[in-house]
Amino acid sequence: MSLLLRGATLRNGSQRDVRIVGARIDEVGAAGTLARADTDEVVDLAGYVLLPAPAEPHAHLDKVLSADIVGVRAHDLLTAIEAWHAHRATIDVDEIAARAIEGARMLLAHGATAVRTHVDVGPGIELRAATALVRVREALRAVMDIQVVALSYPLTGPEGEANVRRLREAAEIGVDLIGGAAHIDPDPTGSIEASLRVAAEAGLPVDIHMDEHTRADLDLSDLAARARDFAHAVTASHCVSLGFQ
């Protein structure tokens, strides 16, 4: 079975016919020039713009569709985090996976075929969210590329040792990247170093929440300096306080 898209407008403004065979674009021609094959399903895209599928680079599918369940009404990030931490101790792998797969399908229905999702790894939730999202990743592999980032904090101080151990365990069950949240760790530089160390041991990239605050100072420079000697890809997420520079 193949798909013939007729008269689509491309992003350069031209009108084209596009034939798709399986998962690949097989042929592109001027509008009205591609003859219909016996195996073609034809879709008239006159008046529609045809674009590559978008990607969602930063989701939290372990938390998707949970606002009404958790019941947070204050418009404050730290209050929401505290409420979520209390709630996450009460949920299991199946509940997380059910919400996550519904959220992923909503993204897919709006065209996104690639998603990177952070998942909490820490006290109360342990590895349940990571386990759920690895399951969802595999369930949707035929239609969507999902990358799972193990997110834990703090990674320094009294609680840090246990969270570092949890990140290593998350790598063992199959997450795709190691994350962190340096800006809410008592030692931001130490947090960055811990994320990079665990990722290097596992041979994985990192995606770290950076400078998600309204202070004028930056931890991003520490990550940039250490990324030069890191063998894998490094993503700095949020970087909110760059706006103050």
Image: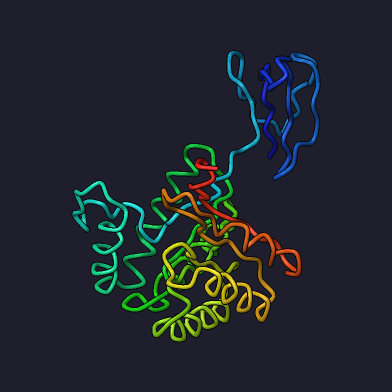
Q: Nearer the viewer, residue 228 or 118?
A: 228
Residue 45 place in picture, x, y as percent = 61, 19
Q: From the viewer's perspective, is residue 27 above or below residue 214? A: above
Left or right relative to 97: residue 12: right
Question: Residue shown at 55%/82% (left/top)?
Answer: 168
Q: Position of residue 153 (x, y in %)?
A: 43, 71
Q: Quadrant of residue 25?
A: top right
Q: Quadrant of the C terminus?
A: top right
Name the colour scheme.
Answer: rainbow
Name the quadrant of the N terminus: top right
121 relative to 109, above or below: below
Front residue of 200/62: it is 200
**At 27% from the left edge and 74% from the top edge, which residue is drawn?**
89
- In this rendering, the answer to whether 96 lies above or below 71 is below
Front in this rendered view, residue 178 or 236: 236
Question: Which residue is located at x 57 percent, y 77 percent?
Answer: 194
**157 left or right, relative to 242:** left
- Residue 39 x/y as whole percent: 71, 34
Q: Nearer the viewer, residue 208 or 224?
A: 224
**What is the total number of numbered labels drawn onto the structure image?**
0
Q: Is residue 136 left or right of residue 10?
A: left
Q: Position of residue 231 (x, y in %)?
A: 76, 69
The quadrant in which residue 225 appears is bottom right
